[in-house]
Image: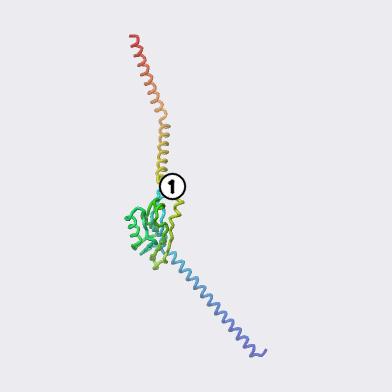
Amino acid sequence: METDQWSLVVAVLAFVSAGWAVKYSRAQALSAQGQLDVARQVHREQSEPYVIVDIQPYDPGTHLLVLVIQNVGPTVARNVRVTASPELSSTHGDEITQALQNVTARTIPMIPPGRRLQYFFDTGARFGSALPMEFEFTVTSEGPMGPVETLRYTVDLAILTEELIGERPTKKLEEKLGKIADGVRDVGKYYQAANEIPISETNQRRRDEVSRRLAEGQQRRSSADDA
């Protein structure tokens, strides 16, 4: 092969190699940029507030339902707005219904990390009513880095019917009274054990007194019969 041809081959190979090098460098740059974007996104998400909305039992066994708005994120949530579709309503009258709708009509200026806001929503009467049982909540807020991604939650009250089956409204009270009764019995046992001798002596004195009175009564009857 002549010199000019070798030169042409070398030039072509160099050009191809340079092209691959540029392509590889560009891929590396894009990969690095992608990793940087992901890292920034993760850092942002870790630094953002996270506001959840739910309707849940206030306490098992009470059949009392509450609307809960809670910031489970690590930073303060500002300018929080919660909307519900359909609008919230309660079987406990227009006053409660209006109070619930006021919650979704206002902007909450600030919810610190871990703060839990609770509002009375309804009772077990809800499950036998014709009122809506499913709601879609939309939450908007702002964090340290600006607006937070809009969050949406679907809450279906029907799933609570299984959870509440068999729970008596007085169950918790019954359990507490049972514990108190057990404690009183234990105190009685300890007292009796600690005062066994004095109690025995007192009981013996009472028996002796009863026996004495019986004997005196019998003696008086005998005397009366002799007379």
In the foreground, 11 or 101? 101
Residue 146 higher or lower than 127, as above or below: below
The vertical placement of 124 against 216, above or below, is below
Residue type for callout 1 = Glu
Residue at coordinates 42% horizontally, 49% vertically from top-left?
A: 60
Residue drawn at x 53%, y 76% as measured from the top left: 27
Compared to residue 72, the image places residue 173 above or below, namely: above
What x and y, as percent, mark residue 24? 55, 77
| Residue 94, image x, y percentages | 32, 56
Residue placed furthest toward the left:
95
Q: Tell me if I can see residue 108 in this picture.
A: no
Direction front: furthest residue? 130
Quarter of the image with the N terminus is: bottom right
Label 1 CA crowd tier, 10 Å (few <14, some 14–19, many 20+)? few
Q: Can residue 156 be seen in this view?
A: yes
Position of the C terminus, as image quadrant, is top left
Query: In the rendering, at what x and y percent does residue 69 appear?
Result: 39, 58
Residue on which the image places disc 1: 167
Q: Position of residue 118 (x, y in %)?
A: 37, 55
Label 1 residue SS: loop
Left or right: 84 in relation to 33: left
Q: Which residue, as the protein is rendered here, is positioned at the far right?
A: 1
Q: For residue 138, which quarter of the picture?
A: bottom left
